[in-house]
Image (spheres, rainbow, N blue to C red):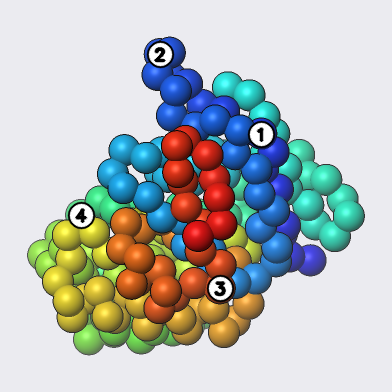
Amino acid sequence: MKLKLEISHIMRSPHGNLVLEDCSYSFDRGGAYLLMGPNGSGKSTLLRICALLEKQDRGEVTYYAGEQRLQHDISLKRRMTLVLPQVGIFNATVFDNVSYGLKIRGAGRQEIERKTLELLEFAGLAAKKNQRALSLSSGEKQRLGIARALVVAPEMLFLDEPTASIDEANTRLIEEMILGKKKSGMTMIITTHDRLQAERLADQMLLIRDKKLVEG
């Protein structure tokens, strides 16, 4: 049963610096939500709070499976993945980087091979599967990071500025990956400062304005 996320009256004020104030929204199951705002607006902070990687100062983050409210435990966190603008790459092959999540979950050898190759093909990196990942371009590394997140089939994917500082060709490929996953019904929450990109990708556009979340 797919996840549903509700945030209610989220406030975040690290070291007394108000970043978010009274943010509420219900993210239904499936679709792409594009969270817009200029640098420093708090969109990355809100994304980390939704992904249970940063604690809000006030308000609630609630996940549901059907009508059941879920505990914020490791089993829930394994159902979601966050990809940051600067992807952490292991000093290993492209294949080993993408397959890592499956290995730590105890997947069998054939499953690892099949799913990893599927995601490498999806990311346009199959021809580089035996190449050292650290030798990839910045755009290729970002596609690798997204493939590594997707290989474990998360129910909710968080992408923080996935095309920041990336060339036009890789931006187009990453957008195609996002559009491809939209068709599968995956729920994605994606930050961007590019309204045109948001219009290309979004089922729903959201905007952080004056530290509050509004529909764009």
Disc 3: which residue: 203
Residue contact between numbered discs 2 and 3, judged by CB atoms under 8 Å: no
Tell me how far mark 1 sits from mark 3, CA to CA: 23 Å
In this rendering, is residue 153 above or below 173? above
The quadrant holding residue 171 is: bottom left
Density class for disc 1 (Cα within 10 Å; few <14, some 14-19, many ≥20) is some
- Give the residue drawn at x 17%, y 60%: 165
Callout 4 amino acid: Asn
Mark closest to the chain's N terminus, 1 or 4: 1
Measuring from the top left, give residue 93's x and y in whole percent: 23, 66
Of circles 3 and 4, the one toward us is 3
Helix, strand or loop for disc 2: helix
Q: Is residue 181 left or right of residue 146?
A: right
Disc 4: which residue: 91
Tell me how far mark 3 sits from mark 4, CA to CA: 37 Å
Q: Residue 9 has which mark?
A: 1
Disc 2: which residue: 15
In this rendering, is residue 168 above or below 44? below
Tell me how far mark 4 sits from mark 2, CA to CA: 36 Å
Near-viewer residue (24 or 180): 24
Mark closest to the chain's N terminus, 2 or 3: 2
Helix, strand or loop for disc 3: loop
Tell me how far mark 1 sits from mark 2, CA to CA: 19 Å
Measuring from the top left, give residue 123's x and y in whole percent: 34, 79
Residue contact between numbered discs 1 and 2, judged by CB atoms under 8 Å: no
Mark closest to the chain's N terminus, 1 or 3: 1
Near-viewer residue (60 or 9): 9
